[in-house]
Image: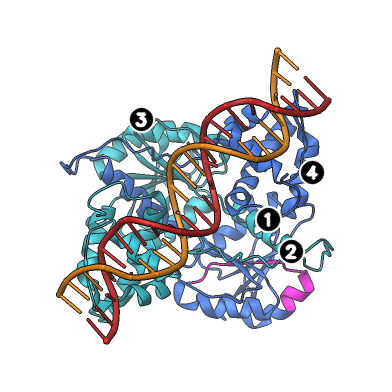
Chain colours: A cyan, B blue, C red, D orange
Amino acid sequence: MASRRRIPEATVARLPVYLRSLYELLDANTGTISSERLATMAGVNAAKVRKDLSYLGSYGTRGVGYDVQYLLFQMSRELGLTQDWPVVIVGVGNLGHALANYGGFGDRGFPVAALVDADPALVGGRVGELVIRHIDELPGVVAELGVAMGVIATPAAAAQRVVDALVAAGVRSILNFAPARVTVPPTVTLRKVDLALELQILSFYRQQSGDETDETDETDEIDEVDEEVSA
Amino acid sequence: MASRRRIPEATVARLPVYLRSLYELLDANTGTISSERLATMAGVNAAKVRKDLSYLGSYGTRGVGYDVQYLLFQMSRELGLTQDWPVVIVGVGNLGHALANYGGFGDRGFPVAALVDADPALVGGRVGELVIRHIDELPGVVAELGVAMGVIATPAAAAQRVVDALVAAGVRSILNFAPARVTVPPTVTLRKVDLALELQILSFYRQQSGDETDETDETDEIDEVDEEVSA
DNA sequence: TAGTGTGAATTTCTTCACAGCG
DNA sequence: CGCTGTGAAGAAATTCACACTA
């Protein structure tokens, strides 16, 4: 019995991938989906899909598959995505600016509700419909707009200060794009995206596969490198 | 004996984190570092650092630690980072534009050498020093500039076509920001960054910790949610 | 009959703990 | 002595394989 709770971390990271597939199926008016087909869509194998979904409960029908709408609902509920969660972007340089304009957050339930920056030259400026506010106003901004999530797009040097400010303002979920190590209290969840780091990992696998840069080693065997799910 | 090759995937993903710490140590003129201190900087534990580094070889000195410069060199070599790898960004919308201006790639050995887009209205335009070229010119661009890596910043619908074009042009390392599942031949390595997906994962853990949205369940125990690394 | 749900086996990753070396 | 390097133990994640049932 999978029963309730304690969903493995690896499973949690895949649920949004399934969710996206389910939305595609919904758009295509597909009523029911098998673990096999869902696995293909999500880029994993069927056993993993079934195991993962079993942590949510027994929502499938033997001999048939999963009801797309019902599974979609249950999964959204489990992920806390039955409502929108407003986001504040801290740091309106290149990256912050792009993230603010990037429709991908709002489309998926995370409307960008506010932009803040420490640079007085930027404060008061507009990006789309939003006016950039000063970082010192963060507590007010968070409270007024019901901000649930913070996105850090500042230089590395500012990251820890920004984290502290977000935490002080009551934000408990933070996504950090600054290539810096930061610490948070245990009540706060922080995830990190380091763009250059991803390229460095690609560089490693490139290296391994013995490119024009001849690396005439024992080539052992070819890696099954393809990041599952990418992750 | 760790001897050579077959570095675990999980270790590979951490090497760039250590590398960044080593650069900080180099800047601070630190000659030698223990696994304990390096672990603290990287946000992992010391046993993991030693195990991970042992896959590269026996580069430490018992009773002393690791020579920062030497380890830095060995690790750079292993990651294939002893030279720069030019990058082409495909898709010069909001995200692509930001990534092009974002200094973080060039700083870490991945100069943005070219920008391409399918939209004739954009082709010929400038972003910084670069002129946007048409995606049909990709083979020439890749060959002329020695492009090693492709970054996809197009809408999801175009992603597979772009991947195919990159592969056809000879690019064998691809970083995909488009929220779409794409397939590549086994000789090509593809990694994926999905920004909204990260927020969805944060939403899950937020949900778990029973926020104002009272979810008066059994709260079991508090998650040790903190993404290592960050943490 | 087709496909889920899940124990059990396997593989991968992490952590422990300590021998061994500078 | 202090700290690395690593077997071995332990935990987590994946995959197998099949009983079960709609």
- Name the chain letter of the residue that bears numbered label 2: A
x, y (%) of residue B1? 73, 44
Q: Earlier in the sequence, mark 4 or mark 1?
A: 1
Residue marked by disc 3 = A168
Element marked by disc 1: loop
Question: Label 3 sits on what residue type?
Answer: Ala
Q: Which residues are magenta?
A: B140-154
Is residue B226 at least partly visible in the picture? yes
Question: Label 2 sits on what residue type?
Answer: Asp
Question: Label 1 sits on what residue type?
Answer: Arg
> In 3D space, how far apart are the residues under numbered discs 2 and 1 (Cα atoms)?
9 Å
Is residue A84 at least partly visible in the picture? no
Judge whether B65 appears above or below A104 on screen: above
Question: Label 4 sits on what residue type?
Answer: Phe
Say which of marks 2 and 4 sits in front. Answer: 2
x, y (%) of residue B67? 78, 32
Residue marked by disc 4 = B73
